[in-house]
């Protein structure tokens, strides 16, 4: 009831007041439109200025740093690949070096064994020649047959031991084959070695001759 009384008490607007009120609302609308247009123009102007002036210098600076780091990373990758290749080459060379050292050691061992075999053969030759000399002396000196037989047995034992050592060394040389160049050189050296004793007989022939002479003298 009170609200109805207040509404009834409000005076009705005249046509002039209504027209003024409409004009006032239209003016506020135009002001809002103008403000909106100014805002749009300002945004468009900022975009235009940004596009015409180019990118931000700070962005360019960071881009250059990024490019520099990218190039450095590529260089590091290239260096790593090169190091890997060097490592693989080093491993292959190490394997080849091990095989070469093994071949050299085998060659040296075979050469040493060959020299030892030759030394044993020379030793046997010396003992046989010594027996030959003792046999000749025993035939010249009367009553010396006994001591010749005693010493001959001892010298036969020495020759047998030397022959056993020679055979063992020769077997070791066969088990450890030397490189081809070393074998070729050894053969050439054997062919080119001068023979200072052209009438020297092999060890077995001399021993056989001594045994035959001893048997003949005993008869």
Image (cartoon, rainbow, N blue to C red):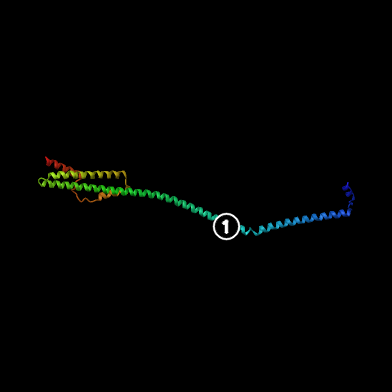
Q: Residue at x 29, y 44 (%)?
A: 172
Q: Residue at x 13, y 44 (%)?
A: 146
- In the rendered structure, the answer to whether residue 87 lies left or right of residue 33 reads left
Along the viewing direction, whichever of 12 and 49 lies nearer the viewer: 12
Along the viewing direction, whichever of 175 and 160 lies nearer the viewer: 160
Quarter location, residue 149: top left
Label 1 belongs to which residue?
65
Along the viewing direction, whichever of 54 and 144 lies nearer the viewer: 144
Mark 1 neighbour class, 10 Å CA radius: few under 14, some 14 to 19, many 20 or more: few
Direction top: furthest residue = 219
Q: How far across and how far down the image is residue 74, in percent?
A: 52, 54
Q: How far across and how far down the image is residue 2, in percent?
A: 88, 48
Q: How far across and how far down the image is residue 11, in percent?
A: 89, 52
- In the rendered structure, the answer to whether residue 11 lies left or right of residue 135 reads right
SS for tag 1? helix
- In the rendered structure, the answer to whether residue 173 lies left or right of residue 82 reads left
- In the rendered structure, the answer to whether residue 37 lies left or right of residue 106 reads right
Q: Residue at x 72, y 57 (%)?
A: 42
Q: How far across and how far down the image is residue 128, in percent?
A: 18, 46
Q: Which quadrant, please, contains the C terminus?
A: top left
How many labels were placed on the picture? Answer: 1
């Amino acid at each position: 009831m009170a609200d109805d009384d207040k509404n009834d008490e409000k005076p009705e607007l005249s046509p002039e007041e209504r027209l003024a009120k409409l004009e006032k609302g239209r003016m506020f609308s135009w002001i809002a439109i103008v403000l909106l247009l100014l805002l749009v123009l300002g945004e468009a102007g900022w975009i235009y200025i940004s596009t015409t002036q180019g990118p931000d210098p700070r962005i360019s600076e960071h881009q250059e740093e990024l490019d520099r780091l990218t190039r450095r990373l590529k260089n590091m990758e290239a260096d790593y690949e090169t190091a890997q290749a060097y490592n693989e080459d080093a491993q292959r060379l190490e394997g080849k070096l091990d095989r070469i050292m093994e071949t050299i050691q085998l060659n040296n061992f075979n050469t040493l064994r060959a020299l030892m075999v030759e030394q044993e053969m020379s030793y046997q030759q010396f003992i046989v020649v010594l027996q030959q000399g003792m046999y000749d002396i025993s035939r010249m000196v009367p009553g010396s047959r006994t001591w010749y037989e005693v010493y001959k047995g001892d010298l036969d034992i020495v020759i047998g031991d030397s022959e056993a050592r020679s055979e063992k060394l020769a077997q070791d040389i066969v088990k450890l084959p030397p490189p081809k160049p070393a074998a070729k050189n050894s053969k050439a050296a054997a062919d080119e070695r001068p023979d200072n004793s052209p009438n020297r007989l092999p060890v077995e022939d001399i021993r056989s001759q001594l045994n035959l002479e001893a048997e003949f003298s005993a008869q």
